[in-house]
Structures are given as C-alpha cells and as structure tokens.
Amino acid sequence: MAGRLARSLLQRRFGQRLPVRLASGEAYVPEKPPVEGKTENMKLVHAINNALDIAMETDSTAAIFGEDVGFGGVFRCSANLRDKYGSNRVFNTPLSEQGIVGFGIGLATQGSTAIAEIQFADYIHPAFDQVVNEAAKYRYRSASHYHCGPLTVRAPYGAVGHGGHYHSQSVEGFYAHVPGIKVVIPRGPSQAKGLLLASIRDQNPVFFFEPKWLYQAAAEEVPVADYELPLSKAEILQSGSDVTVLGYGSQIQILRQACEMAQSELGVSCELIDLRTILPWDEDTVIQSVCKTGRLVVSHEAPLTAGFGAELAATVQAECFNHLEAPIQRVCGWDTPFPLIFEPFYIPNKVRCFDAIRTVVDY
Amino acid sequence: MAAGAARLVGRLGLLVGRRARNYGRMGYSDSAPSRGPEYTTDLAEATVSLTSKQPLPVYRVLSAGGEMLDPSQDPGLPGETVVRMYEKMVGLCQVDQQLYKAQRMGLISFYMTSYGEEATHFGSAAALHEKDMVYAQYREPGVLLWRGFSLDQMVDQCFNNRHDLAHGRQMPVHYGSPEHYFQFISSPLATQMPQAPGYAHGLKQAGSDNCVIVYFGDGAAQEGDAHAAMNFAATLKCPVIFFCRNNGYAISTPVEENYKGDGLAQRALGYGMEGYRVDGNDVLAVYNVTKKARELVVDEGAPVLIEAMTYRLGSHSTSDDQTGYQDMSEVKDWRERYFPRDRLRGYLQSQGLWDQEKEDELVSVTNETIRSAIKRARAEKKPSLEHMFTDVYDVPPLRLRRQKEEVQAMVAKYPEHFPTASHE
Ligand SMILES: Cc1ncc(C[n+]2csc(CCOP(=O)(O)OP(=O)(O)O)c2C)c(N)n1
C-alpha cells in the first residue's frame, strides 16, 4: 500500500508531467556516499524516512507529529512509522501550525525529542510567533535554565513545476533573521539523512527545509548506518579557480549544470559550494574560496530583495574586498509572489546562473 | 435570537435562563455589579459537564430518497428554481468529472472535486442575495456557478490560460470573480475567515443590506484564524454567516483527530452567536437554514454559524488517494444513500418536475459544453509575461520594472531556454 500511495500522492500532487526543470534535462546527479559502509539506493523521501526511523529507534523520547503524518504524510516522509512506533509517538495533530510548533516547543522543553512536520513551508507562517518569539528566545530569556533544543521542524520548500503561490515558496530568509534557531537545507538524499539526524540531535531548535521537487526526483546510494553530518559547515562540491558559485538545497543541482556549462562553453573553472546550514552559516569556507577566486555568484529561489544572498554578498564584500575582481552577482527569484504559469521565467534557472558567471568573468 | 439561544442553551444543559445571559461578564466587573454572576455553593451547578451534553441533532427536510418529510418545512420555491439548482448541480458534477480526467491526462496540473458536497453550495447560494460577498475555501465552486460564472470560465482558470481573470498565477480551482461578488481563493487555510467579518463590518457601516458568507472546512476550523474570526464577528457584531462544510476529513485526518467536542455548531454558543446544524446533502434544508441565518444576520447585524454535515466522496485532491485512509465502504454508503444529486432528483421527480428524458438531454448538453470548453481552453495561449510583474503593487516600482527588463533581455538572449511560444 505504501508504495502505491507514495506514487499516487507524489505523482498526482505534481501531475503526471515532470517538473519543468527536469524536463529541460537538469536531472539530479547522484553523489558518492558521505561515509563508509553498506548503502542502499534511496530517493530523498526514503532517506528522510530512514533518518526519522533511526531517530525514533535510537531515542525513546522522540515523537513525530503534524498534519496527516499518521498515515505517512502527504509526501510519504513518515510512511510506516506509526505502525512501527505506535500512535503515541507518531500522530496527527489538529490542523493548526501555531499549535504544532507551540506543542513542539513544550514537548522539547520537557526534554523529549520533538520532530514536527509542517505540511508545506508556505504554511509555516501561522506559527511565526511561536518560532520567532518563543522557540528562538526560549534559551536566552531563561538563561538556559529552560530551552527547547530538542525541537526540529521539518517542512518541504521550493519550486516544483506547478505549485503556484502557496506550494513553492522558499522561506529561509525570514528565519535566517532570527537569532536562536538554526536553519538547515539539504541538497540530496545522503546529505538529507546525515543533516536531519544532526538537526534532530542538536540541542537548539532547528528548522529543516526539504527540497520537495527532489523527494522523488533525486536518488542515490545512501549509507544505511546511523550517521550525522556537521551543521554550520559548508561543503566544497567542486574546487575551481575562477569563480565561487554558492547556493544551497535544490538550487545546487541547477548550479552544477551552470558550472558545467561555464566550463564547456567558456573554459571557466568554478568552485561550487553548498552552504548546507543557512543559520548560523559557515563564513570561513566561503571567504577563503572567494579570496582565492576573486569572484562570487550566489543563487537562491527566494526573491532577490532581502534574500539570504544579500547577507552572503555583504559579508563577502567586507571580508574579501581587496580580492574581488568583479561585483558579486545574485541570481534569485524576482520580487513578485511565486507565479504559477510564469515559473520557468521566475526561477533562477541554469542559463540565468550561467549568464551571471559569464558576467563576473567578463567584468 | 434570544429564544434561539435559549433553545441551544437548553440543549446543552449547561446554563439556564438568566445565568446564560451573564456568561460574558466573568463576574469581575466592578463598574456594573448588577450584571455580575450568580454564585452557588453547589459545584455541580457550576460544572460544564460532558455527561449532560446532548449532541445537537441535524436539521433535514428531505428524506434520503428525496421525499418531503414535513410539508411545513417546504421552502415553497418555484419549481423552476429547484430545477435550476439541479441543472447547476449536474453541471458541477460533470465538470468535476471531466477536469479530474484532464488532470489525469496531464492537461492541467491539479484539480479538486466537490463530489458529494454539491448541495452545500447550491442550497446556501440560492438563499443569499446575489451581491452578498463570498469568501470561499476552495471546495465551493457551485456558489460561483449559481451566480452565473460559466463552465468556460472554470475551465479557463484551470488551464491557466490568457482568459483566467488572475492571469494564470494561481493553481487550478483558485477561482474568483468580482462580477459575482466572490473573493479570489487563497490556499492557506482559514486565512479568509477573519477577513470576512472585516468586510462585513464595512458593509454595515456603509448602511448596506448585504452580508458576507465565509465557507470553511472542518479542518480549517482548527486554525487560530478561525477562532479570531468568530470571536471578532460576535464581539463586533458583524453581519457574516460562517458556513462550515463538515465533510468528515481534512485530507487523511478524520474529524475525530481534529476536535473532540460535538462538531462545530455548538461552538457558536461559546462565541455568543446563533448556530445551526444542517444536513449538508439536503439542498432544501441547507436553503432553509441559510435563509434563516441571512435574515438574522441582516436584521440583527450579528454573525451566525452553520455547520453542514456532509461527506467527501472523492479524494482530497488529485494529489492523494483516498483508499489509503478512508473506509471505502463508508464512502460507498454515503454515495448510495445520500448523494445530493440523486436526492434532489428524487424530489424533482416526485413533484413531476423531472424525468429521464430531461436528464439525458441535460447530461449530454452539459458534457458537450464542457468538452468544447476544454478543447478551446487547451489551445489558448498562456498569459503574457508582462503579467508576472503586474499587480504586485498598484504601480510597479522602479526596481520591479528593471527586473522585468532583465528577464525580457534574458529571454531574448537565450530563447531556447524559455517557453515563450506558449505565451501571449
Ligand atoms: C495553513 C495551511 N495548512 C495546511 C494546508 C494544507 N492543506 C490543504 S487542504 C487541507 C485539509 C483541509 O481540510 P478541511 O478544512 O476539512 O477542508 P476539506 O478539504 O475537507 O474540504 C490541508 C491540511 C493549507 N492549505 N494551509
């Protein structure tokens, strides 16, 4: 049943056609496993499910809750977990995001590991007060006597081909502005598993945004063991000498293609960096890279103005000023709501990223 | 209104008579001691007891087969009005079937049917004034159809073509139409709810005879916005009808996992407004209740809550599969016994207003209309790229105008990477 449901839920939610970007040939590039040992081929959705399973198995206080998570979640991330761990530990909540996050804060403060799901990042906004004024300030206002560190909130984010205003948004920028929480965005299955386990076990509230267009579209060999990948540590995916290309989440797949295009069409060598944790972010890795290449292109799907790219660009220009050969380029969503039928024009696609690389090289 | 409230109060068995009227004061007001509470040394009297609470019955007019159960409850509508309800209902059923199929064929990206809940749309819409403002959730397109929004317009929106009033920016089924006094639908649940009393307050201040109706699901009713909405409306005396479609599910989540009390209608008492529970599959009962609610709302300038008990016969949307979480024998039972379309048809036939010949004619004409609408809508161009940037503000700011130029230049430079040909 799970298999059939997984197929139907995902394929139907996003139609029978492939998302536009996949249709244009930008398929997910499988990666080498980040740790040694036995592996299994997993899609992103399975890697998340596997991480949740391990988190539940290794921590008897852990609980998973949210809208429709009981039957496995609308994206199937919690499939089979209620059967395995019981409905006291994997359960549906009433339909209220402020309730879900507030409940999670309370549960975590009590000492349990609280793993909340918000069905879409677009629907996290009713919980904004609980995140910004509560989760983020709980430790500070009580001098660590109380804290909600064991809270993790997962939510699918980003463009998917036909999500329109309310099933496509990238919300990391809002939360990157909130000291006291962490924000993590994985780029693919094996990264997601290690980062999610680290997020769940981290003693700070973590907001974990999953690129929904990769749930079914990304598959690779994922280590079956229990492993964590470090938070607040960026990763250099490809070293290069001419331009630093910086992004996170599903945008990494687009940037890979843009880097390849730059190499083949312009002979330009790009250094591709996945930020992985948005807050608190790894300044050193980025600064070192830009001081070496002298050029930076940053890209995210969220709108340009006041997006996280602005923070990255401001820090880099302050730290690498003497090394910069060209103005930093940001390739982002436009400053409009996410527009369904104009999605192919709205997203920072491969050619827009390629064009920005060309701009900094030609400067 | 007082009589209605007392009746509800009596049913609940919680508070009686004078005490019921005082529940708003909390007993803490120094300024008006005469309106303070009554005190008791009997805790039982001061108990909100779950055991004494009776479930509110469901008001109905037609039997499952469509017979008039009590002639005194016959709304006395002209035959042609009831026939029109039926024709529109058939239109909705057929367009649901065909657009659902169109999604399956990959022609549109998403769809949601109203399968099984049609009577809530037509019964309520027919009882409203055509200029009463509608705030819908998403599963109420029949209200628009009743007001004259055409099947062609529905199809154009779902195909996101250049005729879509909102320029293809939103997912299918997110209709809206100023001509039909219908706000554009927003996917985030319950956000429309507190807006409705605001609009209603404005109407009242302007001396309008119109009111507002806001539709929402049993799931949406659990959002914080739902609470704010009803409390604002009651406290500020806003002429708004809260219409809950209680269809048993919020995607996979059954109502038992969304609330523990006796449904939604009884919440009305907590907010200090009148409430009704009605059989949502009985179009005439929904009509009677909405008509009564509208009278109250317009005469007294205060809100009313209606809970229409219905059942979601289909999957939540094209994104899920109900067989994974719904008891399909329950679905079958509701389909066979209470399907609104069959029930209304039974009534019409018993009145001599309908027969098989009319049915066949209606179904074939409707299907043909929809088929040609789909054929036409499919071939239409998508809206102009211009519209990615219009309506963000009343006047596009300079930065946005520059972004538009940037994307146009990008499209000109790399035409093979953008689907320009399909756009106007
Ligand atoms: C704020 C918000 N949270 C979650 C969702 C995802 N979602 C869409 S419909 C739905 C269920 C709604 O159920 P209900 O209100 O009962 O209406 P029904 O679909 O049954 O008509 C959910 C959880 C959403 N659209 N908005």
Image (cartoon, rainbow, N blue to C red):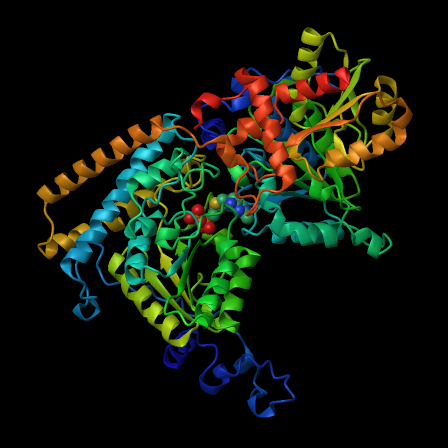
Q: Residue furthest right?
A: A322
Residue B31, quarter of picture? bottom right
Residue at 56% in and 43% down? B392
Q: Nearer the viewer, residue B301 or A34?
A: B301
Q: Is residue B61 left or right of residue B207?
A: left
Residue A228 pos. (x, y %): 76, 28
**Does B303 appear above or below B30?**
above
Q: Quadrant of the C terminus of chain A?
A: top right
Residue at 47% in and 62% down? B199
Residue A76 pos. (x, y %): 54, 33
Q: Is residue B92 left or right of residue B407?
A: left
The answer to whether residue B267 is visible is: no
Q: Is residue B283 left or right of residue B162?
A: left
**Does A23 appear above or below B40?**
above
Q: Nearer the viewer, residue B85 or A356?
A: A356
Residue A292 pos. (x, y %): 87, 18
Q: Nearer the viewer, residue B66 or B74?
A: B74
Residue B419 pos. (x, y %): 49, 22
Q: How many marks?
A: 0
The answer to whether residue B227 is visible is: yes
Residue A16, quarter of picture? top left
**Does B318 appear above or below B283?**
above
